[in-house]
Image: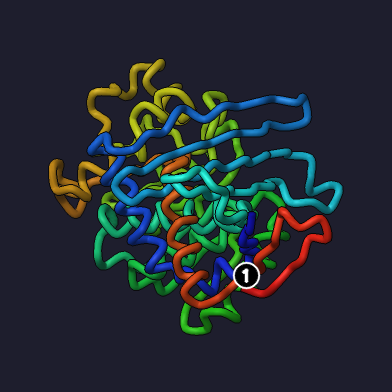
Amino acid sequence: MQLRLLPAHVIDEALPMLDAINVNAQAYRLVSRREVDMPQRVPLRTGKGIALFMPAYVKHTGDLAVKVVSVFGENPRMGLPTIHALVLVMDSTTGRPLALLDGTRLTALRTGAGAGAATRALAREDSRVLALFGAGGQAIDQVEAVITVRPIEEVRIYTPSGVSAERLATRLSHRHPHITFRRVDSPRAAVQGADIITCATTSSTPVFDPADVAPGTHINGIGAFTPEMREVQVAGLPRLRVFVDSLSAAQAEAGDLIQAVAEGHLRWEDIVEIGQVLEGAVPGRTSPDEITFFKSVGLAVQDAMTAGAVLARAEDLHLGIVVDMADPNTSVTKG
């Protein structure tokens, strides 16, 4: 059996951000059409962190994959990433394993691309200022996705210490010298006057004051993924409409929304899946003053379809490393 290994740099080469956004938009549409076989992710807690197992099968495209991802919050103290992940892609007609991808890189790419698809559908077209909360492994792709779909001129980055925000601002400035990237010293300085707010943290308390949010702002909440986490407080956001990647997943995992519903600030029946907007079944933004909030907990179908797109391109371009798993000497060849 031969298995293609696709490390992070190959994923970047195989699937540019705009292509990834289009793939994830299609994934959201298929979710809302109920054309995806996607069991609820299985969490296993170890005391130090959580491991998640996320399978999905997409009949429409033939994508079949499972991701194993771990989130261990104390890892940075040991010089390790908070998130580790692998994605196994299989042939949906034979069950044969086809490829193993760097799931940490794929997760960041598809999470950014998913937020990019929602931003393209919901944010005002004249959005110029992005406020970013968090500077971890998800942050760069969140920025790349937003600047791909909107004409962003300024990105304000806030983290509690400011150190990682400064590093990220410097790194992004080298990538995009035509955009102003800067660290700010308070949540208010980040949010006031921002057109788009993206939250990519593991916070259990809201990271900004709703009173500082201007009418017409679009908010992406992608960091909180358990019922106990809460990056965004919806109470106090006027003319708010809430959108999710999957209603069933949000009801199980999206602490921002679960807590807001329990407190009487939201009703599940008023929340819309972004795929319904992308399908044209439900309107997205209906006025310049509306505040839109896209809450994502991340879906296995995003992993499966993004990995499938990466693998197809990698095979065409002969990227990655092909390992012969049946050979006891484990012969390895370039793709």
Seen from the viewer's position, the closer of residues 56 and 148 is 56
Q: Is residue 243 left or right of residue 200?
A: left
Number of callouts: 1
- Give percent across and percent down for residue 262: 40, 16
- Using the rendered view, name the quadrant where residue 182 is placed: bottom right
Instruction: Please rate how many residues cluster around mark 1, counting C-alpha atoms within 10 Å: few if below 14, some from 14 to 19, many from 20.
Output: many
Seen from the viewer's position, the closer of residues 191 and 14 is 14
Check the image and name the residue furthest to the right.
78
177 w.r.t. 261: above or below: below
Seen from the viewer's position, the closer of residues 283 and 166 is 283
182 w.r.t. 134: above or below: below
- Coloration mode: rainbow
Looking at the image, which residue is at 43% across and 41% down?
296
Looking at the image, which residue is at 46% across and 74% down?
316
- The C terminus, quarter of image: bottom right
Looking at the image, which residue is at 65% across and 66% down?
322
Badge 1 marks a residue whose secondary structure is loop
- Give percent across and percent down for residue 199: 50, 48
- Using the rendered view, name the quadrant where residue 226 is placed: top right
Q: Is residue 223 left or right of residue 193?
A: right
Looking at the image, which residue is at 31% across and 24% down?
266
Q: Is residue 185 visible?
A: no
Q: Is residue 201 left or right of residue 299?
A: right
- Give percent across and percent down for residue 247: 33, 30
- Give percent across and percent down for residue 280: 14, 48
Q: Which residue is mark 1?
A: 320
Q: Is residue 186 visible?
A: yes
Q: Amino acid at mark 1?
A: Gly
